[in-house]
Amino acid sequence: MADEHVMGRSNWVFIFLGVCSLFFLTYVAVLSGRADRTGEPIVRIEFIGTYQTSESGPARQVTGDIPVTETGGNQLILRGRFSSDVPVNTRLHFYMSRMTVLMKLNGQVIMSYGLEGEYLPVIRSVGTEWFSLASPGISIDDKIEIIITDSYPGIYKASYDIFLKNIYGGDGNALLLNQVSANIIRIGAAFLIFIMGLSLLASMMTLKFIMKASVMSGYFSCAMLLICGSTCTFIDYQYVTLLFPDAFMVNMLDYLTQFFIVEFLLAYLYHYIRGPGPRLFIKVLIYIWSALILVYYFLLTTGMRDTFQVLDTLLLVSVIFVVSPAVFLFIESKAHQDRRTRWVIRSGILLALFALAEIINCYITKQYWIVLFQFGLMIFTVIQFFVMMDYAREKLKKARETELLENELTRSRIGMMISQIQPHFLYNSLAAIEGLCIEEPALARKAISSFAHYLRGNIDSVNGAEFIHFSQEIQHINYYLELEKTRFGERLKVSYDFQTEDFFLPPLTVQPLVENAVRHGVTKKRSGGSVTVSTKDAENSIIIVVNDDGRGFDVAAKMEDGRVHVGIENVSQRLAMQCGGTLVIESKIGRGTTAVITLPRLNGHAGPARKSLRPDLTASPTGSPSFRQ
């Protein structure tokens, strides 16, 4: 049963992944439909003409990529025309990458972008994003002049080529679909990694906070690593900035996820390094990296440094933080014998190598190729997913087994308590019958008949039922009272005051209290006394009160045989364990005792019962309820 229960939970994970994938494909289909309905396809527009690196510099024909060495400074001047007409109000889209742009049509300025005052003063450029404007009407014969200024001269060398290769005319939705289609495999991989990371995080939280199982904190770091890694690989400015036009926030999210990838990778792999020296070294790296994140954002928000001004330094430092754990993991891989641990270590080494290759590529080209890192992250994700599903399956199985053992222990304790009460009641009943056999044989015969009736109709149900209807508990009480009334006669008076009767409760919870009231209360007084059993319906609970005006007793004192009151102790414990109920006893010597049971409303327990479960109740000649059989 435990294995089936665990496998059922695992199947739900795969169903969840399937639903999310279906949602993603549906979104792409809807996006495609939106683009088709516009009736305005997207068209790539080429610039035909010459370029100069300064006003006095030589003019060269634009043919393919512009050689970086020829651009010299930080400015590029383009003069020529577009390869196709752009009708009035057709959207023109330009892909800007950390630059300012001034565009003129036949000598008139029609576009300015990235000029000072158009972005936050603490940064040097808007960032990387799409910029669009409505065409004033451009023909292939119109003269176009574009002046591009690189915000980071000599640093981001591909800015000019990126601009020239990404000029489009047409609908923005069509452009978005075009970019999504071109990157669909990458987007799908990022989406799948994100869903797996989210699933793993949910699984670990379920184990820890719902199943109360012990979970290694490193698994939370792994789940967050996957979520951050998928977010980072999803962020391609060529389509993301079409969805979210705030380029600065997209850039900040991109850099933040990159920082956290290293942070969570270190935190996760830390748990698989055993030597005290290497563990201390990795822990120090985690603290240093966290401090670097704070320093970076301090420099950025104060305007002291921009991201690209410290990019080379960050990349070089990242190499240390990625290579170090990979080296330690390689050493550890030879020592670990556990199959699951070896797979984790190998996948961690592989991810670190791919991340290193990505860092080196970015250092050389100043561009994120991202494909290498995403490929390594996908391999890492698949391995981690199955490793942690195996871990979760194992934990769930152990939690299920623990739960079954705890339930069995609870049932055993309850059974022991009931077995303590039942012999106690049987002994008292037989003792009462024994006292009548010589003096009043007729009453003894009646008592034996009632006693046999009780044994035949009720003992089996008490042993087998976790909860019984209140009417059955009253039936137990009546059979007991009939036996006691044959002995004490008019000295024992019983009354009932039921405001509510249709509920369930644990068996033998009221009867022992009535027995205490009779044997240790009213029958200890020469004149006898009365016992009252009442119920009332409170807002969120049912109250049962057993009251007597007998001799009273010290609740904390021991009985004559040296034991505490068995019935009271067991009733209190069983109420707490079975339904969260409580028992409160108040007693004053010479004035009587009051026992109050509080049952919380639980569906099927203390809540309303079906009428068919309740025996018919009529008044007996003695004034106490009797039950039709």
Image: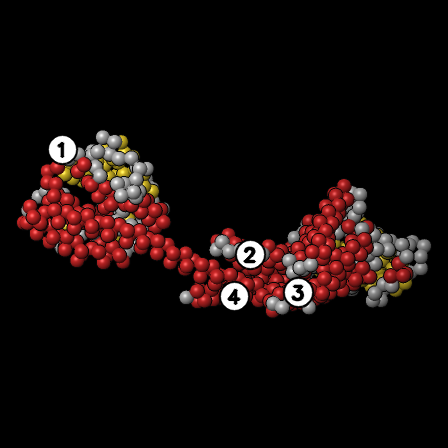
The quarter of the image holding the N terminus is bottom left
Q: Which mark is residue 527?
A: 1
Asked which quadrant contains residue 373, the reply is bottom right
The quarter of the image holding the C terminus is bottom left
Amino acid at dot 3: Ile
Please report whichever mark, 4 or 3, sits nearer to the chain's N-terminal start.
4
Amino acid at dot 1: Ser
Please report whichever mark, 4 or 2, sits nearer to the chain's N-terminal start.
4
The answer to whether one can see residue 383 in this image is no
Structural distance between the alpha carbons of marks 2 and 1: 66 Å
Asked which quadrant contains residue 352, the reply is bottom right
Badge 1: few (under 14), some or many (20 or more) residues near its Cα, within 10 Å? few
The answer to whether one can see residue 344 in this image is yes
Structural distance between the alpha carbons of marks 1 and 3: 83 Å
Structural distance between the alpha carbons of marks 4 and 2: 22 Å
Picture coordinates of residue 438, whole percent (x, y)? 7, 48
Picture coordinates of residue 442, whole percent (x, y)? 5, 49
Q: To which residue does mark 4 refer? A: 14
* Residue that protrudes farthest toward the front in the picture: 561
Which mark lies nearer to you, 1 or 3? 1
Please report whichever mark, 4 or 1, sits nearer to the chain's N-terminal start.
4
Picture coordinates of residue 288, whole percent (x, y)? 74, 49
Q: To which residue does mark 3 refer? A: 345
- Mark 1 and mark 3 residues within 8 Å of each other at the beta carbon: no
* Residue nearer the viewer, 39 or 487: 487
Asked which quadrant contains residue 91, the reply is bottom right
| Residue at figure coordinates x 77%, y 50% from the top left | 307
Badge 2: few (under 14), some or many (20 or more) residues near its Cα, within 10 Å? some
| Residue at figure coordinates x 20%, y 41% from the top left | 519
Q: Which mark is residue 41?
A: none
